[in-house]
Image (tube, grey):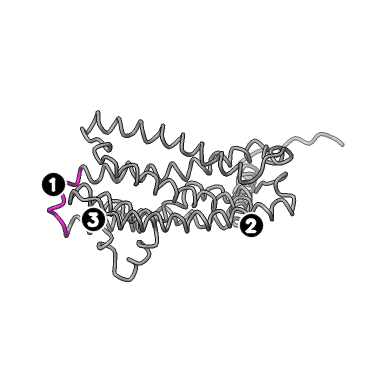
Amino acid sequence: MPFRRPQTGPLASARRVAAMVRRYWYLIRGSWPRIAELAYWPTIQMILWGLISQFFTTHSHWLADAAGVLIAGVLLWDILFRGQIGFSICFLEELWSRNLGHLFVSPLRPWELVASLMTMSLIRTAIGAGVASVIAILLYAFSLFDLGPPLVAFFVALMLMGWGMGMVIVAMVLRYGLGAESLAWVALFAFAPISCVYYPVATLPDSVQWLAWSTPSAYVFEGMRAVMVDHVFRWDLLAGALALDAVYVAIGAAVFAWAFAAARRDGRLLQTGE
């Protein structure tokens, strides 16, 4: 077959650009997580910062304590985020390296994989949140450790929620392929407005406050403000958070078990991709 020189010139370049644009458009069109992500971040940011602005506009007396409350909220939210992302990323690394199939021709059991992901999530969170907490002391003279023993309770409750969500995200990746991997970064932030990280649950419209009380994180952040502002530890809030954590972990385990069994049956453990 004779060698054909590629066409050159503005028209040929435009066709090649259009061909690549079509390729990327097909990737977006064929993946609902990618489509959802296009509008996801602007919507979440608008809702979250709108609620923050509304709260501080109507509760100006909180501004005196806002610095400590906001920094504590950021650090505790980071614990939740790192707990979930640490779980998900370790699993995704097995997919990126095409190693998942190799793992499960060994005696490794699914629950053992989950236990190892939880352990690595705990290690990664301790390192990341620990460094951030030390920097907060150095830069802002604020120590999260001043919360005392309640900090341990908050940490446990947030990690359990992160693990429950991590199992659901891993299940979605097993079901829909790497096209759903962006869920590892974006899924948790859908909970940010109703977790009430920077403002009380009462700031939310009455019609959606029940959504906040269906998340363990809302109980944790309400408990954090009770400790910092009212100087009281709310055992009822901790009990609510741990009860919901049990539900989140149970749902996550069930969804993961279902997705893993389906992936093994269909042969997707060896060829998980887009």
Q: What residue type is labelled 3?
A: Ser
- Name the residue: 29% across, 30% down: 135
80 or 34, nearer to the observer:
80
First along the sequence among labels 3 and 2: 3
First along the sequence among labels 1 and 2: 1
**Residue 192 horizontal/vertical position (percent):** 37, 53
Judged left or right of residue 43, residue 266 is right
- Name the residue: 29% across, 45% down: 150
Q: In which quarter of the image is residue 53?
A: bottom left
Q: Quadrant of residue 97?
A: top right
**Residue 204 horizontal/vertical position (percent):** 29, 63
The residues colored magenta run: 58-67
Residue 22 is one of the magenta-drawn residues = no
- The majority secondary structure of the magenta stretch comes to helix
Quick one: which residue is furthest to the right in this view? 1
The residue labelled by disc 2 is 258
Q: In which quarter of the image is the N terminus?
A: top right
Neighbour tally class for label 2: few under 14, some 14-19, many 20 plus, Cα within 10 Å: some
Which of pointers 3 and 2 indicates the residue nearer the eye? 2
Which of pointers 1 and 3 indicates the residue nearer the eye? 1
**Label ID, residue 53:** 3
The residue labelled by disc 1 is 64
Q: What residue type is labelled 2?
A: Trp
Marks 1 and 3, how far apart in space? 16 Å
Judged left or right of residue 74, residue 253 is right
